[in-house]
Image (cartoon, rainbow, N blue to C red):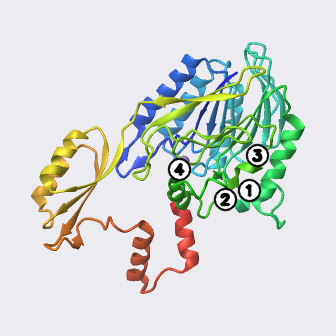
């Protein structure tokens, strides 16, 4: 059995004024080509299908077109779940049409697919469904694919869906029990068992050692759901497919591979992973499951750069003309309108241009456009102080962070 795992497509994403739709079309095409070349038996898309709750029509069409193409005429089922950027209702809405095509879309954590007959023209069959679970008979293989699916929901909602809103236990325990129940009921050695979720999953032992995690954590964890530990994964599971973090990496290989495929394109200047991948999972009977990363080659790089002086900046812009750029120039004096014009004209995808003024002693005496050395939370606090003559309260700051995440 061969399965393709991808996530965090963020269709409809814009970066300032830059639409990423053309790049997204190219990379969607590339993902379809890989699925066709590899002749995969199923595809998993693990959340953040769209970038916003209300995506543009073009993004919706690109999603439907891509999912439909991935099913290769009812021979390759696609399971897609909602991420924190998706409106669960919007993900659920196409269900009646999607099901007929072999596309299983789950917007809510306890969603259960209708157990319909896909007709005699396809070997694809739904063997079992339950709340948060589906078992499929694939086109060419007798071994069934079991999928435990837990789309994103914030902590409170996730607890509500799992029927435990009033209980004191933390989300971790409640999810563990939910997963364990499903795994014990449906997942034995006679099938391939995968668990899909769009949550923040960490290996408790590793987290202090991994510096990259801290940045991601501060962005993604706040206001969302509690981090899930790898030790909560039921032992029956052969592979955990994750979405949420945009860097392709395995969180752990115990009790099975627990893997973030990452996004197919670079979506933020803070994204330190400039190589993007999809994952191909392989499970042969009687052998342990393996997986490989397949490089994606489409889309622009996002580069954040500090350079001293205009000439060097122009040179660097020329060398990196295909990237989308956030440039800070250190200069002796504020940039003139003319200099700004020259720099802006030198690059098609100059997303942010700011300057950093250096005094003779080398000290910063002011910044020009935007205060790029401050983070957005500090800027928000300053803005609030100017508008309301006071610093924002903790609860307002929390709300602001949740919106950011
Ligand atoms: Mn995402």
Q: Position of residue 102 (x, y in %)?
A: 69, 26
Q: Residues within 10 Å of mark 3 (few under 14, many from 20)?
A: many
Along the polypeptide, which appears first: circle 1 or circle 3?
1
Along the polypeptide, which appears first: circle 4 or circle 1?
4
- From the viewer's side, name the closer residue of 387 and 146: 146
Q: Quadrant of residue 355?
A: bottom left
User: Residue at coordinates 77% horizontally, 59% vertically from top-left?
Assistant: 159
Callout in the foreground (3, 2): 3
How far apart in space, not on screen, are marks 1 and 3 (Cα)? 17 Å
Where disc 2 sits, the SS reads: loop
User: Residue at coordinates 22% horizontally, 39% vertically from top-left?
Assistant: 319
Q: Is mark 4 within 8 Å of ligand 1?
A: no
Q: Are marks 3 and 4 in contact (CB under 8 Å)?
A: no
How far apart in space, not on screen, are marks 4 and 2 (Cα)? 18 Å
User: Residue at coordinates 16% horizontally, 50% vertically from top-left?
Assistant: 312
Residue bearing mark 2 = 225
The quarter of the picture where the C terminus appears is: bottom right
In the rendered image, the vertical position of residue 159 relative to residue 274, given as above or below: below
Q: Which mark is residue 52?
A: 4
- From the viewer's side, name the closer residue of 140 and 360: 360
């Amino acid at each position: 059995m061969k399965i393709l795992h991808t996530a965090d497509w963020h269709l409809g994403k814009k970066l300032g004024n830059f639409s990423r739709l053309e790049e997204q079309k190219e990379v969607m095409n590339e993902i379809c080509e890989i699925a066709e070349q590899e002749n995969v038996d199923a595809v998993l898309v693990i959340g953040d299908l769209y970038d916003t709750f209300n995506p543009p029509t073009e993004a919706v069409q690109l999603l439907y077109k891509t999912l439909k193409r991935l099913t290769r005429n009812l021979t390759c089922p696609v399971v897609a779940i909602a991420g924190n950027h998706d409106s669960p209702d919007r993900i659920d809405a196409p269900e009646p049409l999607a099901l007929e095509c072999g596309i299983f879309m789950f917007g809510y954590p306890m969603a259960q697919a209708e157990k319909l007959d896909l007709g005699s023209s396809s070997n694809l069959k739904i063997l079992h469904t339950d709340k948060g679970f589906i078992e499929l008979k694939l086109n060419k293989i007798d071994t069934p694919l079991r999928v435990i699916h837990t789309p994103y929901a914030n902590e409170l909602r996730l607890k509500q869906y799992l029927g435990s809103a009033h209980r004191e236990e933390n989300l971790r325990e409640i999810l563990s029990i939910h997963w364990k129940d499903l795994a014990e009921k449906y997942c034995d050695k006679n099938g391939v068992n995968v668990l899909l979720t769009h949550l923040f999953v960490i290996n408790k032992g590793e987290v202090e050692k991994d510096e990259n995690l801290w940045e991601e954590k501060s962005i993604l964890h706040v206001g969302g759901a509690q981090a899930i530990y790898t030790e909560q994964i039921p032992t029956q599971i052969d592979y955990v497919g994750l979405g949420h973090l945009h860097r392709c990496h395995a969180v752990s290989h115990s009790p099975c591979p627990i893997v973030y495929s990452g996004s197919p394109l670079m979506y933020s200047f803070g994204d330190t992973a400039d190589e993007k991948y999809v994952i191909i999972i392989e499970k042969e009977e009687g052998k342990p499951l393996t997986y490989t990363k397949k490089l994606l080659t489409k889309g622009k790089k996002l580069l954040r750069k500090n350079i001293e002086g205009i000439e060097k900046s122009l040179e660097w812009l020329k060398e990196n003309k295909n990237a989308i750029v956030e440039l800070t120039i250190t200069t002796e004096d504020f940039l003139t309108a003319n200099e700004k014009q020259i720099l802006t004209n030198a690059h098609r995808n100059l997303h942010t241009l700011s300057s950093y003024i250096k005094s003779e002693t080398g000290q910063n005496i002011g910044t020009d456009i935007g205060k790029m050395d401050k983070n957005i939370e500090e800027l928000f606090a300053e803005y609030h102080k100017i508008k309301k003559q006071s610093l924002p309260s903790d609860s307002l700051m929390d709300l602001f962070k949740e919106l950011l995440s």
